[in-house]
Amino acid sequence: MSTEKDHKISMKPNQKRDMVVKEILKPMFKNAGFKCKGMNWWKELEDGYLFIYMKNSRFNSVATGCSFSFQFSASRFDEIHDKIEQQYIYNQMKMNCIEENVFLPHCGYLSTVHNGLDYTIDGYQSYLPKDMPVLVIMNRIRDDFDQYIMPEIEEIKTVSEFEALMEEKKKVLETKEAKLLCFYSHCLMSCSYDSNMPLTLDMLKRIQLSEEEIKEHYDWLKIMTAKFYLPHLNAVPYIEKALQIVKTKK
């Protein structure tokens, strides 16, 4: 395992990601019985295969940081279309997959290295480059997989068991907590421009949360703001303006 002494020279975001994969994830997945080719892993089940596919954002750069996520899916033996390492493509098309956020506490929104949609390493904050220590990143992602993801994934013995887990985990995104965190994230990205208010009002209508529920966890919003690329923003006035508009229309 690398030490902090090995990384005194600043690393690019994608180099940190590659170190996470090489030193943390590949050994972990191998120990769990997965084979690997590129950023695709698969494990034989009793009646098919279990897949892990690492998806990288097309917008990765020094300015935006390095964003990536993991898709979990399964296919029966007679559903394999082509090369085993490309089966994830067909599973994506059928929407038969889940990602790591549904395993994580608060869907990852309050994590130092996750934004609720994917892992994001560095990027610019307040117009200056971030440089989170690579060992901090490695330890956080290792803990996520050790504590929350792999214990459930390693229990899967059949495709049906994965399908049951997938349906259970998809329900996580429909909980009050997940809807609220998603709304806070939306408001952080939208609060700089009043022209975004129609989208915010539409989202309020869809998530069906009360004013009290919306205001209940401004402490979560504070944590999310601190790691946002513009941490000086205050989305609370924007949120409360949206709530007032909704109240006025009733």
Image (cartoon, grey):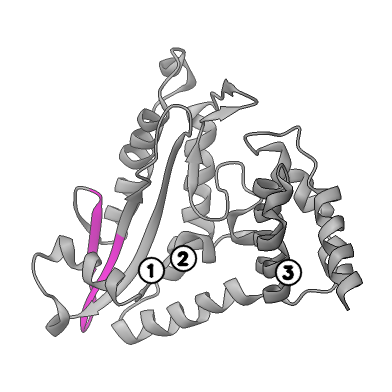
Which residue position holds label 1? 154
Res 158 → quadrant: bottom left
Q: Locate residue 228, reporting x and y percent.
A: 65, 39
Foreground tag (1 vs 3): 3
At x 41% / y 21%, what residue is drawn?
11
What's the magenta region?
39-52
Q: Secondary structure at mark 1?
A: loop
Which residue position holds label 3? 204
Q: CA distance from mark 2 to mark 3?
A: 35 Å
- Let me know if residue 216 appears in the view: no
Q: Secondary structure at mark 2?
A: helix
Task: Tell me, yes or no, whether the two marked residues, 2 and 1, touch with CB atoms within 8 Å.
Answer: yes
Please state, as top left, top right, bottom left or bottom right, where the C terminus lies in the image: bottom right
At x 74% / y 44%, what residue is drawn?
223
- Let me know if residue 194 appears in the view: yes
In the rendered view, tell whether residue 82 sits above or below residue 48.
above
Q: Secondary structure at mark 3?
A: helix
- The type of residue carrying mark 1 is Glu
Disc with the residue nearer the chain's start (2 vs 3): 2
At x 86% / y 49%, what residue is drawn?
237
In the rendered view, tell whether residue 34 sits above or below residue 21.
below
Please identify the dominant SS of the magenta region. Answer: strand
Q: Locate residue 95, reporting x and y percent.
A: 35, 75
Residue projecting furthest to the left: 82
In the rendered view, tell whether residue 159 sits above or below residue 119.
below
Q: Locate residue 114, reporting x and y percent.
A: 55, 47
Say few, some or many: other residues with alpha carbon within 10 Å of mark 3 (under 14 / 14 to 19 / 20 or more). Answer: many
- The type of residue carrying mark 2 is Pro
Which residue position holds label 2? 151
